[in-house]
Image: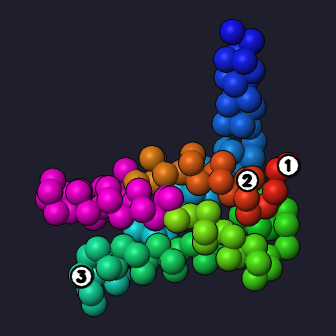
């Protein structure tokens, strides 16, 4: 019983924090830029490919925002590489959700991007906090 309690306290400390709130705000900015880049690229390529290309463009911006403002670490090539790797689960989730949203549900790409962010965001935060920028 004590282990369960400690687990929930750890979840609370992780997700009910200023740092996670900042991550969510910048995640919203990232989601908007991702949606805009995806929409822009969808004029030149297939929508699923545009999602991936938009993902990398928006995450380049997100790396600098996270480095400077949330985790207070200088951006390095090694951290950028780890940052991209930490987003792979989010990319996979996002691609699948977007694929289903566009191709199966026939909804606009924008809604796939929003749903993907809601699912992948918290997972990405944990991976990024531990793997990319170190525990803090």
Q: Which of marks 2 and 3 is nearer the N terminus?
A: 3
Label 1 residue SS: loop
Q: Which residue is drawn at 19% across and 57% down?
A: 107
Q: Name the residue under label 3.
A: 46
Q: Which residue is drawn at 85% across and 73% down?
A: 74
The answer to whether residue 32 is left or right of residue 132 is left
Q: Position of residue 132 (x, y in %)?
A: 73, 63
Query: In this rendering, is residue 19 above or below 104?
Result: above
Disc 3 crowd, CA 10 A, few/some/many (<14, 14-19, 20+): few
Label 2 residue SS: helix
Label 3 residue SS: loop
Q: Which residue is drawn at 61% across and 78% down?
A: 60
Query: In this rendering, is residue 110 above or below 80?
Result: above
Query: In this rendering, is residue 122 above or below 82?
Result: above
Could you say which quadrant of the image residue 44 lies in? bottom left
Q: Mark 2 points at which residue?
A: 129
Q: Can residue 69 be seen in this view?
A: no
Disc 2 crowd, CA 10 A, few/some/many (<14, 14-19, 20+): some
Q: Where is residue 19 in the image (x, y as percent from the top left)?
A: 75, 47
Name the disc covering residue 136, or none.
Answer: 1
């Amino acid at each position: 019983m004590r282990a369960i309690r400690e687990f929930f306290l750890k979840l609370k400390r992780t997700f009910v924090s200023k740092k996670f709130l900042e991550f969510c705000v910048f995640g919203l900015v990232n989601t908007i830029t991702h949606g805009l880049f995806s929409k822009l690229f969808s004029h030149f390529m297939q929508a699923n490919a545009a999602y991936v290309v938009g993902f990398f463009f928006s995450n380049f911006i997100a790396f600098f925002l996270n480095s400077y403002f949330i985790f207070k670490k200088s951006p390095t090539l090694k951290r950028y590489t780890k940052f991209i790797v930490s987003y792979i689960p989010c990319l996979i989730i996002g691609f699948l959700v977007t694929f289903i949203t566009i191709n199966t549900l026939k909804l606009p790409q924008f809604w796939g991007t929003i749903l993907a962010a809601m699912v992948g965001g918290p997972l990405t935060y944990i991976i990024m906090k531990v793997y990319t920028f170190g525990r803090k």
